[in-house]
Image (cartoon, rainbow, N blue to C red):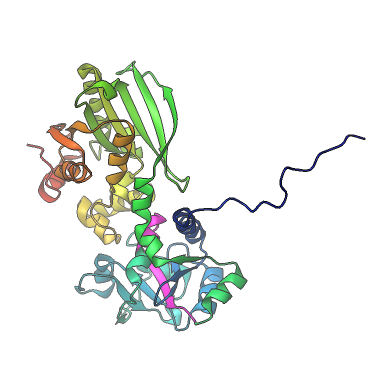
Amino acid sequence: MTHIPPSEDTTAPPPEVSPAVLRVRGVHRAIAELRRGTPVLLVAAESLVVLPAETAGARGLGELMQLGAEPPVLLLAPARAATVLLRAVPPGAVALRLSRHLLDPARLRSLADPTAAELLPAEPPPALPAPAEAGAALALGKLARLLPAMIAAPARPDAAARAASLGLLSVAAEDVLTYPIAMAADLIRVAEAAVPMTDAPDARVVAFRGPDAGIEHLAILVGRPEEAAAPLVRLHSECFTGDLLGSLRCDCGAQLRGAIRRMAQDGSGVLLYLAQEGRGIGLPNKLRAYALQDRGLDTVDANRALGWEADERNFMVAATMLAELGVQRARLLTNNPAKVAALGACGIEVEREPHAFAPNGVNDRYLATKAARFGHLLG
């Protein structure tokens, strides 16, 4: 009989996990639960039970009711709330009373999504004071790349115990609000390979991943930018429709390919391909915004009508990647002053290099909006 020796230490405790990692894990798991329609307990001085209107179903609503001390409300960003209420509202989250008639998944989605089937009530639901943690609740919905419209109820005193018995997660509101900074500051360089391209044969791609092991950001290195005093740099937010499909609605594809060509001509450069589709709102929401633009809204008002800010991107991600790549000075290919300011605030010395492309007959209004409402320097 073969003798199998015992492991070296069967009684050793598992390695300690830092509090910071535990906080990140908690938010990441909460995001996954919300996307599958499961409520989460948002823990704070005044805790809330929250569930996205976009993914709410009968089971999730039933679980929320078991943890809530009062009837739930619908939390909306002010621009969407103003449309539902048919009047202007002050800044900040707005809470709408949900009658039993409105506690229906299809009607909840209609309240949240201006592109959904019109199932709004004849009379707008009453507005109520928003709970203290309404901002954190909407922020959690945004992190899940869902519409920022959250069903919420004040938690019962025994909500934590009830949540545990139902297998529901709890997450601290403070952890939700600090999560984007943690994701940007702690990116990890995970892979690198040579990827010769048509316009840049001497190119490499470096992959970066956040501590939540979620989405990846990419750095396309042309030549040896780490050896240049101030290489060309482009911060390019991924655009499935423009970069891959060649959509004429934007200038993203032209900017991507033009930047790579220019870096090759210059001898080196860094293009950061950031996983921030649609200025940070995600592809499904960008498609919703397109639908609203087809009804007459511009790109700014379309985003706001969905409950998002005009630009939700976090450029600290880019600064972290550049620091890891050894780039402290950059000639930034951009027309967006916000990118210059953001990198400068993160300690990167920046000189702007214009990067404009002519309208194509379809994206003329889009480019005009970028100039008029975002301050892009397209002249």
| Residue drawn at the location 13% of the way across and 32% of the way down | 354
Residue 143 against residue 331 in the figure, above or below: below
Q: Is residue 85 visible?
A: yes
Tell me: 246 left or right of 164: left
Q: Is residue 147 magenta?
A: yes
Residue 291 higher or lower than 86, as above or below: above
**Where's residue 165, x and y in %?**
62, 72
Q: Residue furthest right?
A: 1
Q: Which residues are magenta?
A: 139-156
* Number of disc labels: 0
Any magenta on residue 334? no
The image position of residue 211, as x and y in percent, is 45, 46
Image quadrant in which the N terminus is located? top right
The residue that appears at 45% across and 84% down in the rendered structure is 70
Q: Residue furthest left?
A: 379
Q: Horizontal and vertical percent for residue 172?
A: 43, 66
For residue 312, above or below residue 96: above
Q: Is residue 12 left or right of residue 6?
A: left
Horizontally, residue 209 falls left or right of residue 77, namely: right
Image position, residue 27 (x, y; %): 45, 58
Q: Which of the two residues, 71 or 176, is positioned nearer the viewer here?
A: 176
Q: Quadrant of residue 131?
A: bottom left
Residue displayed at 30% across by 80% down: 129
The quadrant the C terminus occupies is: top left
- The image shows residue 148, relative to residue 315, as above or below, that is below
Observer able to see residue 245? no
Q: Quadrant of residue 79?
A: bottom left
Quadrant of the rendered image containing residue 323? top left
Task: Name the residue located 53 percent from the left edge and 69 percent from the top edge.
Answer: 60
